[in-house]
Image: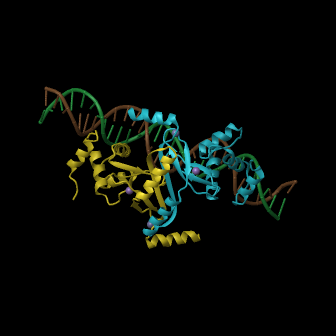
Chain colours: A yellow, B cyan, C brown, D green
Amino acid sequence: MHKPASDNAQDIHSSGLKATWPRIRILRLFQQTTQRHLSAEDVYRSLLADGEEIGLATIYRVLTQFEQARLLTRHYFESGKAVYELNEGQHHDHLVCMICGRVEEFFDPEIERLQQQIAERRGFELREHALSLYGVCSNPACQAKAWAESRG
Amino acid sequence: MHKPASDNAQDIHSSGLKATWPRIRILRLFQQTTQRHLSAEDVYRSLLADGEEIGLATIYRVLTQFEQARLLTRHYFESGKAVYELNEGQHHDHLVCMICGRVEEFFDPEIERLQQQIAERRGFELREHALSLYGVCSNPACQAKAWAESRG
DNA sequence: TGGTTAATGATAAGCATTATCATTAACCAC
DNA sequence: GTGGTTAATGATAATGCTTATCATTAACCA
Ligand SMILES: [Mn+2]
Ligand SMILES: [Mn+2]
Ligand SMILES: [Zn+2]
Ligand SMILES: [Zn+2]
């Protein structure tokens, strides 16, 4: 079910990085966690809870390196802090619940095509894009809270 | 051509805010500047250059208040700092040049419709969205720089 | 035309992230 | 396998943007 640690070491090595214990543990976390989208602080707390001794500075450094190596991708979701997720090669965009923070993923080829078209028409060479939809998710608790908030 | 200051005071008043001199000057700057998208620091420097004595804290406070009053809208563009622009009622999204920072605006009704559809299908009540396209603009200098960067 | 009260601005604090640097541990040649 | 080289780590300081604090100032209204 889980990739063995040696495979993690392979992935890290083939990115031109030494297969250190912190790097192996961070990559493994992203492969095993159910919560796909994690901040640096999330990763830190999760590894501490697992009994690892790791520095927060290392986590920031490694997340940046993994992003450059395309092992992870980074997003902002205007929460004030970056979140990362495992890069499994399938580009997608996000729906974020403004109440509970739940993140759902979607991919719409028509939107992708229209973005490309808009860039071309203006002479832009499109490199990347960020599309996030914000709202209230289908969870009844979230809808109730949203309704309560709208009343004050 | 320009709205008189008294109109600014009106706009501010009808948002439930006192028409103070700093608020009038900040709103006027957004109405008169050619560079639509300004950070707090941009506003600060511009007003200082105009000979105004104003505190940076006031600018941050007023920008937040104007956003809540829907006089301005805020964006991030993953530059690490927020930028604001005058809210003229026409929603639009952005193309950002990764070389020179130029911002172009676009509105695509088909993309808007598809976003709404995606949210509905998943039971999300869509509240807002952020769509930014990043690339290299049509400026030949930018294309040359992009080419140079890709070589190292 | 004051009195009330919110707004201002200097500065401190907060928060996410990056830089510094002495110590540690991967890796590679042997 | 061992040891030396060199990059990685982690504690901590520094940074950059933003918000909080609080004494002073100035809009507004009676
Ligand atoms: Mn995702
Ligand atoms: Mn705009
Ligand atoms: Zn929710
Ligand atoms: Zn450009």
- In front here: A58 or B89? B89
| B84 relative position to A32: left or right | right
Q: Is residue A136 visible?
A: no
Q: Position of residue A109 (x, y in %)?
A: 40, 57
Q: Position of residue C25 (x, y in %)?
A: 24, 39
Residue at 72% across, 57% down: B11
Quadrant location of the C terminus of chain B?
top left
Q: Position of residue A126 (x, y in %)?
A: 45, 46
Residue B35 falls in which quadrant of the image? top right
Residue at 67% across, 39% down: B48
Count up the numbered dots.
Answer: 0
- Which quadrant of the picture is home to ligand 3? bottom left
- In front here: B121 or A54? B121
Q: Position of residue A123 (x, y in %)?
A: 50, 43
| A70 relative position to B20: left or right | left
| B69 relative position to B100: left or right | right
Residue at 60% across, 45% down: B40
- Tell me if residue B54 comes above or below residue A92 in the rendering: above
- Tell me if residue A110 comes above or below residue B125 in the rendering: above
Q: Is residue A124 visible?
A: yes
